[in-house]
Image (cartoon, rainbow, N blue to C red):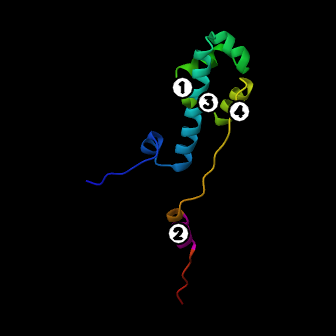
Amino acid sequence: MRVQSLSSVWDAIEDNPQIASSLKARSTLMIELSSMIENCGLTQAEAAEILGVTQPRVSDLMRGKINLFSLDMLMDMASSAGMSPQVKVSKPKAKFLKRRHNESKTEIIA
């Protein structure tokens, strides 16, 4: 049995690395926004006013309905709450670059 090490639960759930990255970013923002609302003791209506959304949207946020939120929307909500959301980009892994380089080589047989 081969054991595979993954950097997050999203990598285990989603095979597509682009979708997994989006899910990671969205879940992080949702957790931070939910924590801020709870720690400040805000009602959903108060949070909605601060975040610039409706109370049902805050309810969706608090219930973790990740599929209902885009990354843009969550970034806007965090900014409206006075947070400073940031994007961190790492350099590509060497094996990824090597694989891409090998895939791009074309062989012409005459």
Q: Mark 3 near mark 1, Cβ–Cβ under 8 Å?
A: yes
Sequence-first disc among 1 and 2: 1
In this view, which residue lies farthest toward the bottom? 110
The image's mark for residue 6 is none
- What is the spatial separation of the Cα atoms under label 1 and label 2, in whole angstroms? 37 Å
Q: Where 90 sits versus 12, above or below?
A: below
Q: Where 39 sits versus 10, above or below?
A: above
**Residue holding disc 2:** 98
Q: Amino acid at mark 3?
A: Phe
- Residue 14 relative to residue 41: left or right: left
Q: Amino acid at mark 2?
A: Lys
Sequence-first disc among 4 and 3: 3
- Residue 9 relative to residue 36: left or right: left
Secondary structure of the residue carrying tag 2 is: helix
Residue at x-position 55% and y-position 65%: 97
Q: Amino acid at mark 1?
A: Lys
Instruction: Identify the image quadrant of residue 85.
Output: top right
**Residue holding disc 4:** 84
- What is the spatial separation of the Cα atoms under label 2 and label 4, in whole angstroms? 35 Å
- Given residues 59 and 28, the one toward you in this image is 28
In this view, which residue lies farthest toward the left? 1
Instruction: Identify the image quadrant of residue 88.
Output: top right
Residues in magenta? Answer: 97-104
Q: Amino acid at mark 4?
A: Ser
**Residue holding disc 1:** 65
